[in-house]
Image: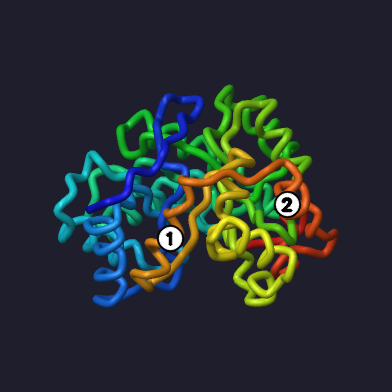
Amino acid sequence: MGNSIPESTLHDGLRIPVVGLGTYNLKGNQGVQSIQYGVDQLGYRLLDSAYNYENEGTVGEAVRRSSISRDELIITSKLPGRYQEYEKAMIAVHESLYRANLDYYDIYLIHWPNPKQNHYVEAWQALIDAKKQGLIRSIGVCNFLPEHIERLEQETGVKPSLNQIELHPFFNQSELVKWHKKNHVATQSWSPLARANDILEKSSLQQIAESHRKSVSQIILRWHYQLGAISIPKSASPERQLENISIFDFNLEEEEMAMISSLSRPDGRLKNQDPATYEEF
């Protein structure tokens, strides 16, 4: 029996679960089975993919095999950096749909701003037009800085519904999260568990986990939830998938939240991918 995951409402009215299933590296039949199990058996309804993950077909096949109707699912994909020119972006959106054999995506994001190329505004216009055509329900961005988002709104009149950013205890992005809240842009966390075993071995986190009789992963995902962030942890393991959404029966105290946030460090990015300079292919 699936778990009930709370939902958050984006500024355009789309309601999405506060925890989703990341699908990076979930590919082929094994990937289909992992995603389908998460949907059918555990109650996941938000699935996060990307053009550059090369698994949109896997996600689409899991959706087709699932016993859950398409309209109950929120499926995300992302536009790669090499296709940000307007015509290329429109083609990429269609290609994403063809790969997944879907009629529409619920959410489609620009994966990185790629500021040196300076095509992200026309990519945004392409997503605006794709939404008007019924190919996308909600449009947003990944890894954008406030100045990038402000420029999108100034030049097109349309603000992203969410910004998916690197966010974990080693890099809490507190100022950007505050900016999102002030400007009604939802925060979504990629790599919410930092993709690093050392975070799970932090004694301070282990102490909090023991006091709540939860795992360190659950403590971190609960931290995201109480920050108001939508997290998308990735796992192929049924046990870990269940663990990642079993976080709604306890609360972290303010002191515990502050302690977790204090683990953040200036060089906390996992791969030193600074949106001000990083260029995605």
Residue 199 horizontal/vertical position (percent): 68, 70
At horizontal 54% and vertical 60% (from top left) the residue drawn is 213
Q: Which mark is residue 29?
A: none
Q: Nearer the viewer, residue 271 or 209?
A: 209
Q: Name the mark on residue 51.
A: 1
Q: Amino acid at mark 1?
A: Tyr
In the picture shown, does residue 202 fall above or below 66? below
Residue at point 59% right, 58% down? Answer: 192
* Left/right of residue 279 with respect to residue 69 in the rendered view: right
Foreground disc of the pair 2, 1: 2
Which image quadrant for residue 54?
bottom left
- Earlier in the chain: of badge 2 and badge 1, it is 1
Identify which residue, 102 or 163, lies in the foreground: 163
Position of residue 102 measured from the top left corner of the image (x, y, whole percent) = 24, 50
Q: Give SS at disc 1.
A: helix
Secondary structure under tag 2 reads loop
Mark 1 crowdedness (10 Å alpha carbons): few <14, some 14-19, many ≥20: some
Query: Residue at label 2?
Result: 172
Q: Please state the horizontal and vertical placement of residue 24, each as a whole percent of the image.
A: 45, 67
Towards the viewer: 28 or 7: 7
Q: Amino acid at mark 2?
A: Asn
